[in-house]
Structure formats: structure tokens, C-alpha cells
Amino acid sequence: MTKTSTTTNPRFRGKPLAMRLLIIFSLTLVLIVCASVSRGKTEAATAAVQDWPSADPSCGSEVGNTLRRACGNCHSNQTNLPWYGHVPPISWWIRGHVLDARKRLNFSAWRSYSLRERRDELQSICGVIMTGRMPPSSYTTMHPEAKLKAQEKDAVCAWTTMEIEQEK
């Protein structure tokens, strides 16, 4: 078994230290630029047209707090990204998931939904929470505070049932 040093390694032969440092510096600079561009796009995507608290149908209630904690980061315009949410390519993946989540349900746009859309969403909320599809495990792994206890799920479903009745 022979040891190869950087002076005998063919990849480094003929490349002075200054050239290697320049390459490392350039790659670092590219990553920084990507991160700042990505951050700008994420901030633009999360600008609230309507604030969550004024649009949230359960504003100020215990259920509202539960929904905000477990669902609000993706299903509202009030996304609060963690530090790694600003680092490409992770930021691109998160941004895509958030935009997809908002297309499916956006609590910040709740008042703009038709009566039928609100009823459909209320029924769906209970279903996806009770089956464990929401919040997804990929999210709760990094955000354990978003995990819902059985009593919280029951409270959300009771609220959705009450809201559906009031919407009639």
C-alpha cells in the first residue's frame, strides 16, 4: 500500500496552490450567489396578499393556533423558513413544496374561496389530518412541534364539522 501525497497525485500535478484556492473561492462565491437569489425568490413568494390572522377562519382560537403551528408554514403566505431553507438546493425543494401546498390550500386566501371551496377544504382538512397524511412526516421530522396529538386532531375535526354546518 503506497501513500500518495498531493504533490504526486495526478489531479493536483501542475496546479499550484493559488489555482486550487481560486477554484474553491469561486465555488463558494457561486453558492453564496445562488443562496441570495433563492432567498429573494422565497421572500417574494411568501409576501402576504392577506395576513393569515385576518383571513384565518379560526382566528385566535385554540384550533387556529393548532392549524397555524402544524399547517401554517406551508399552507399560508406566512412561511418562516429555517436557516437551511435558504441554502440551495434544499431551498429549491422546500420552495416547490410550499408553492404546491399553497395551491392545494392557502389559509391566507381563505376569504377569497367560494362557499363550496371552503366546504370542500374543511372536509379535506379533517380527512388528511385523521389519516396522518398531514402534516407529512418529512415536515414533522424537522419540525416536531407540528406533530398533532389525538386530541388536537379531534378538536380540528370538530371545528371543521361546526364550520361546515355554519357555512350552510
Image (cartoon, rainbow, N blue to C red):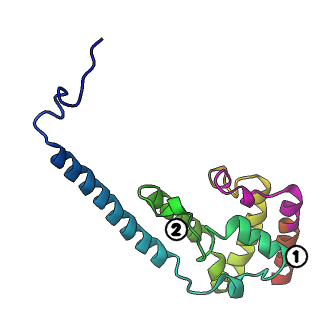
Left-right relation of 30 to 135? left
Q: Is residue 71 above or below residue 13?
A: below
Residue 15, position in %: x, y?
13, 40
Q: Amino acid at mark 2?
A: Leu
Residue occupied by mark 2:
99
Among all residues in the image, which is located at the extreme top?
A: 1
Residue occupied by mark 1:
162
Picture quarter with the C terminus = bottom right
**Closest to the observer: 61 or 21?**
21
Characterize the magenta stretch by its predominant secondary structure. helix
Among all residues in the image, which is located at the extreme left?
A: 14
Q: Amino acid at mark 1?
A: Met
Describe the element under mark 1 as helix, strand or loop: helix
The reply to whether residue 168 is visible in this rendering is no
Left-right relation of 163 to 42? right
Q: Within the magenta stretch, is there residue 150?
A: yes
Pointer 1 local density, CA inside 10 Å: few below 14, some 14–19, many at least 20: few
Separation of residues labelled 1 and 2 (CA atoms): 29 Å
Give the mark count: 2
Q: Residue at x 14, y 42 (%)?
A: 16
Describe the element under mark 2 as helix, strand or loop: helix
Q: Which residues are magenta?
A: 140-155
Q: Residue at x 46, y 61 (%)?
A: 91
Q: Is residue 78 above or below residue 3?
A: below
Q: Is residue 104 above or below residue 77?
A: above
Left-right relation of 39 to 69? left
Q: Within the magenta stretch, is there residue 63?
A: no
Q: Residue at x 47, y 71 (%)?
A: 42
Badge 1 or badge 2: first in the primary sequence: 2
Q: Residue at x 18, y 30 (%)?
A: 7
Residue 121, position in %: x, y?
71, 71
